[in-house]
Amino acid sequence: MPESIPLTDLQIELMRALWSKDEATVVEVHQEISKQRDLAQGTIATLLNRLEKKGAITHRTEGRQFVYRALVSEAEVRRSMLAQVADRLFGGDVPLLIHQLLAEREVSPGDLAEVKALIAERETGTKRKPAK
């Protein structure tokens, strides 16, 4: 996914529905989204079409239905959107971004320990999988 593809909150919800199922029809995505929002099935179809035009998803035809799947992972979308936020709102200033997060959010001691461990790993050049 190119870094320049912005996704709206609703598009992210649709992507989450696809990530959770690997593949899904419009009906299946609609059922998942309907748990949180009251949207028509036609609206879901339109939104999926827009996501496909952006290069975030693709489809195959099964009978008379389109079966959609994500072309990008949730991690890729997070990375892309976080880079956009860091660049657009913080001018690429990572310490300011981290300061803002820590100042504005309730952070548990466990979360702070996780952040400290990530910083230590970055300083030593080792890598591990995130806890969450």
Image (cartoon, rainbow, N blue to C red):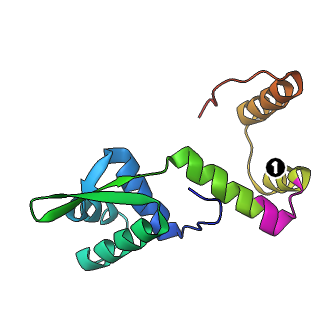
Judge left or right: residue 91 versus residue 2.
right
Residue shown at 29% from the left, 59% from the top: 59
Secondary structure predominantly adopted by residues drawn in magenta: helix
Start and end of the magenta stretch?
A: 86-93
Q: Quick one: quadrant of the N terminus?
A: bottom right
Residue sitting nearer the eye, 65 or 112: 65
Q: Quadrant of residue 110?
A: top right
Tell me the SS state at disc 1.
Answer: helix
Q: Position of residue 38 (x, y in %)?
A: 32, 75
Q: Is residue 108 above or below residue 125?
A: below
Q: Judge by depth and name the residue closer to the eye, 20 or 57.
A: 57
Residue drawn 46% across the image and 69% down it: 10
Residue occupied by mark 1: 102
Q: Quadrant of the image for the C terminus? A: top right
Where residue 60 sits, quadrant-wise, is bottom left
On the question of residue 55 being in view, the answer is: yes
Residue 57 drawn at (x, y percent):
40, 58
